[in-house]
Amino acid sequence: MNSYSATNVSHTLQRHSKRLPGLLSLILCIALCVCSTYWIMQLVKPASRVLLPMPQTEVPQIDIASASGLFGDPAGLAVAASNYRLVGVVVAKNPAESVAVISANGKPPESLRIGKEIMPGASIKEVHATYVLVSEGGILKRLILPEHAQMNAGLAEVSPVRK
């Protein structure tokens, strides 16, 4: 079997030996073309330009609180109201029945439901346990309970225990 493979290889080499010089010439011609193309491109290419960095400018400060309303956070849009003072709130299970006690421009406090006007152009939109949203000329303003009123509001939510 060893002699068969040796004779088979020698017959194959004899048969393809006529094509070997042409194949070798083709490979060398391709290598010469690639080499000459590379060096011609190196000689012809334009000189590289020097790029200067962009001048540094001061980065403007961005107020994140003003952008929080972009994704539906109405509390982010609320602005603190200065001429109203929230005295107390009564939050009902039905939001339409909730009541806010508000003093406007130093006047005596009034109890108002959602949708009622505090002053012309200003009405109550939402009543929550610690704050109220007021719409004044289309702008939402947040009235927050004072610190002592928030503590009392937490005590009022506790229901009595029956014995």
Image: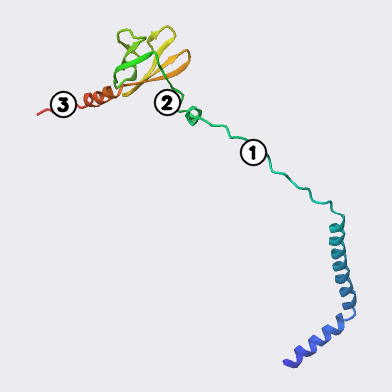
The answer to whether the residue labelled 3 contacts the one labelled 1, judged by CB atoms less than 8 Å apart, is no
Quadrant for the C terminus in the image: top left
Going by the image, does 11 lie left or right of 163? right
* Residue 126 placement (x, y as % from top left): 38, 19
Check disc 2 and report the residue beneath it: 75
* Residue found 29% across the figure and 22% down from its top: 93
Answer above or below: position of 60 versus 107: below
Check disc 3 and report the residue beneath it: 160
Going by the numbered disc 3, the residue's amino acid type is: Pro
Q: Of marks 2 and 3, which one's residue comes earlier in the chain?
A: 2
Q: Of marks 2 and 1, which one's residue comes earlier in the chain?
A: 1
Give the distance between the C-alpha atoms of the residues marked 3 and 1, in whole angstroms: 65 Å
* Residue 84 placement (x, y as % from top left): 37, 14
Answer above or below: position of 101 versus 16: above
Looking at the rendering, which quadrant does residue 83 occupy?
top left
* Residue found 24% across the figure and 23% down from its top: 152
Going by the numbered disc 1, the residue's amino acid type is: Gln
* Residue found 42% across the figure and 19% down from its top: 141
Q: Secondary structure at mark 2?
A: helix
